[in-house]
Amino acid sequence: MQDDFTVFWRNNDRAYDLFYDLLDRSERGAYDDDFLAQLAAYREAAPDSERADIFAARYLLAHNDPETAVLCGERAYAKRPVNLAVWKVLSTAYQAVGREMDALTMCGYIQGMYPEENISLTLPDNMRQEALTRFSLAANRTCYAPLVTGRVSIKNNALDFNFDIFIGEEIPIEMPTGSPRFWVGNYVDEGFLSAMSTVFEPMRHDHNFFVNNRDVTFDIQKATELTGTATITVPAGQSVAVPIAGTQFYQNFSIETAAATYPGYLGKWAFSYVRLNETTTLRSNEAPFAVGTPILLKHSPARKKLVLNLLVDGLCWPAARGIFAEHMPRIAKFFSHGVIFDQHFSAAEHTQPSLTNIETGRYSHHTHVFNERDSHQMPFDIRTISEQMNDLGYYCSAPLVSGHSLYYGTYRGYDRLIATYGFLPAYEGAERTLRTLEAFPDTDHFIFYHTTDIHPLNIQTPIKFSTEVEVNVPLADRFVVLDPTVPSVRTPRLPIYLEQFLVNMHHVDRSIGEILSYIEAHYTPDEYIVNLYSDHGCALHDPYTTQKEIDFVGEYGTGAAWMMRGAGIPEGLTVHDLTSSVDVYPTLGHLCGFPVSPAIDGCLPAIFGGTPREVTYSFSQYASQSYKLAVRTDKHVLRLETQEVVDEDGTVDFADAHAEIYPRGHELEPEHKINCVDLRAFFYPRARSFVHEIANNGEFWPEMRAARPEWFGAND
C-alpha cells in the first residue's frame, strides 16, 4: 500500500496473480507440487486471506486427507462464514469424516443462498428429524424467527420445501453448553390458553397469512420438552416461578410436592406459570410438555434490581435533538438527571446488523451479521450482552422484540422473548414490561424493549398511518406514491412521514414515560440502570435529501440517540464526545460488572473513565450495493464509496474507491471538499485498517459471481 495518501487503495498485484493462477490450477484439478509452491507464495503475499485455506482444503480433499481439510476449512469459515467456496469444501470434508450433521448445515447454507448448486444429503437414521430441521434452518432466507422460508421434508424420495414456522417445538440453533434451546409458543397473557394454537396449526404453512399478519406474537422461551415427569429443585428458603407449556389441547397435568398433589391443566403451545416454594415434580403422562427457565424470586445485593435497555428503532438524534424536550417531555425529563450523548453514531445503517453490533460490541465484519439471506450462527466466544447478564444471575427477558437476528445467536442469553415478526408498538411493550415487573417484584431483571413506532414504514404496500396524522395532513400530502421496490431505508422525505415522526415521538414518550414513572416510584436511583438508544438514524430527515439520493451513512442516517440514568451514571450531563453504538456493550460491562473482551470494537466513554474516541465508523455493508463508509471526527468526515458492489460474503474490491474529506455538516457537498494532505494522512490509515478484513483484492470465486449476474454481469 502506498503512503503518499494520494490514492485511497491499491490492490496487491502479486497476491492477485497468484490467486488466479491457483484458481486455474484448482479448476483443472492440477493439485501437484507446483500447486503447493504457488500456495506457499500466496500465503506469504496474503497472510490474512481465507482463500489460501480454501485452496489448501481443496488440495487435501484431492489427496484424500479430509481430516486436515476440515482444519483448513474451519479456519477459512472463522474468517468468512458466509461464503460458497468455504461451504463447499466443508460440506465435502465433514461428510468424509463422518460429521453428517455439520455437513448438512453447510449444505443448507448452500441451498438457501445458491439453490441452483447441486447438493447431496446424507441423513443419519438415528437423527433424521433433527437433521431435516437443522438443514431447514441453515437453508432459511429470512432473519426473523420463528419463520422459516423452506422447511424441508422428504416426499417421493425428493426434497420438498414449504414455508413454515417453528411452533410448539425447539428452534434448532446450537446453544452453549448447559443452555436449553428456545422453544416457541403462542403469546397468551390472559385468556384462552389453547385458542391461538387452533389458528396457527392449520395456517403455519401459509406464507401470506404471516406476511400479512405481522402482529402475530410468539412467546419464545428457553425450555426443555419432556415426557412424563420433571423435577424442579428449589433450594430451602427460596422460591421460583416456572413457565410450563403443553403440546395438546387442554392437557391434563399435575404438580406433586412432599405434602400434596395438585391436579391442573396446560394449554397447547402456551406458557402458564406456577410458583414453587419447595422441590417439586411436574407430571403429564398423556403428552410432552415444555418447562422453561425457573425464575428466582430473590434479589442479590451483587446485582441491580433492574437494568432496562430501551431500543427506540430509528430515532434520529439530529432530527430529534432540537425538539426532544417538546415532543418527548417525559423521556427528556427523566434523562435530564442522567447522561445524554449528543454525538452518537450507529455503526450500521439498518437494524439487522446494527442490533448485533450493539449486543456484541463488535462491527459487522467481526460478527459477519450483515446478510439477511444468511442464517449462520456467531461463535460462542462472541459473548452477547444478554449472555453476560444471564451469567450474573439476572432474569433476562424481552417483552417487546422482533424475532430479527435470533437465528444468528444475538439473543441467546435471553430467557424469554415476546416476539413479533413485524410491528412493535410501544404501548404493548410498556404494558408487558410493567406486568413483568409487577409479576416478579423480587427478581433481578435485565429487560430489553424494542419499539419500531418511530421507524418509518416500508412503502412496499399501502400504508395505514396514525389516524392522528391522516386527519391532520393536507389532502395533497395524504397519499404516498408507492414504489414496491423501495425499502424503508430509502423512504423519501415527504410531509406525511415528517408528521408521522412527530406524532410517534409523542406516542413513544407516553408509553415509555409510564415505565419511567413506575421506575421512579418503585426503585431508588442506585437500584436501576435505564439505557435508551436507537440502532440507527433516519436519512429521510436530512433536509437535503430532496436534492440528492438518500444518504445511508450521513449524519441523519446514522446519527442515533443514546442516554442513560441510574446507578454509577453522572447526573445532568450532556456529553459531546463521539460515541458509537458498539460502545453500549463495554459501558454496560463497566456499570454492571461483567467482563469485557479486548477483542470487541466498542470503547468505554470518557465519562465512565475510558478514553475519548478519535473517530466513529458508520458503514453500509449491504450485498448487491456499493460499500459506503463515514469516518467522523468532531470537525471532519471522510466519506468513501466503492465502485464495485458488496458480494454475498461481505467482501468488496476497494480498488478505485472514491474517498473525499468534508467538514462536518457538509458531507457529500462538492463545494465543501477539502484537499488537505494532513487530513488524508489522518483519515486514510484509519479507514484502510477498518476495511482491511473485507477487502478482497479483486479476487473472486467464479461460482459466486456467476450466480449474481444482475450484480456483476453475466460474463464477468
Image (cartoon, rainbow, N blue to C red):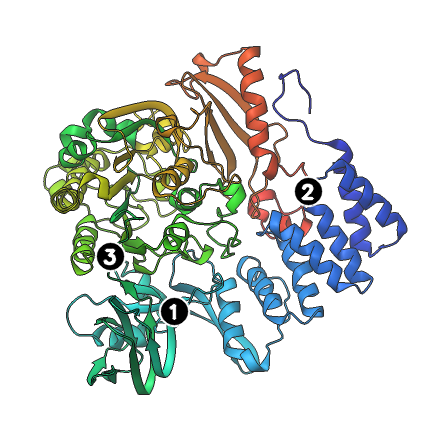
Q: Along the horizontal axis of the image, is 98 left or right of 620?
A: right
Task: In the rendered view, tell whether residue 109 sits above or below residue 698.
Answer: below
Measured from the top left, where is residue 660 in percent x and y? Answer: 51, 20
Do tag 2 and tag 1 residues touch (Cβ < 8 Å)? no
Q: Residue sitting at 44 percent across and 12 percent down?
A: 671
Measured from the top left, where is residue 25 in percent x and y? Answer: 82, 50
Q: Along the horizontal axis of the image, is 525 left or right of 42?
A: left
In this view, the residue in front, 570 or 689, is: 570
Q: Secondary structure at mark 3?
A: loop
Which residue bears the numbered disc 3? 443
Q: Does residue 42 appear in the picture of this structure?
A: yes
The CA span between labels 3 and 2 is 48 Å
Q: Secondary structure at mark 1?
A: loop
Do tag 3 and tag 1 residues touch (Cβ < 8 Å)? no
Q: Residue sitting at 62 percent across and 62 percent down?
A: 117
Amino acid at pointer 3: Thr
Amino acid at pointer 2: Ser
In this view, the residue in front, 493 or 698, is: 698
Q: Residue furthest front?
A: 236
Which residue bears the numbered disc 2? 49
Q: Quadrant of the C terminus?
A: top right
Q: Tag 1 or tag 2, which sits nearer the N-term?
A: 2
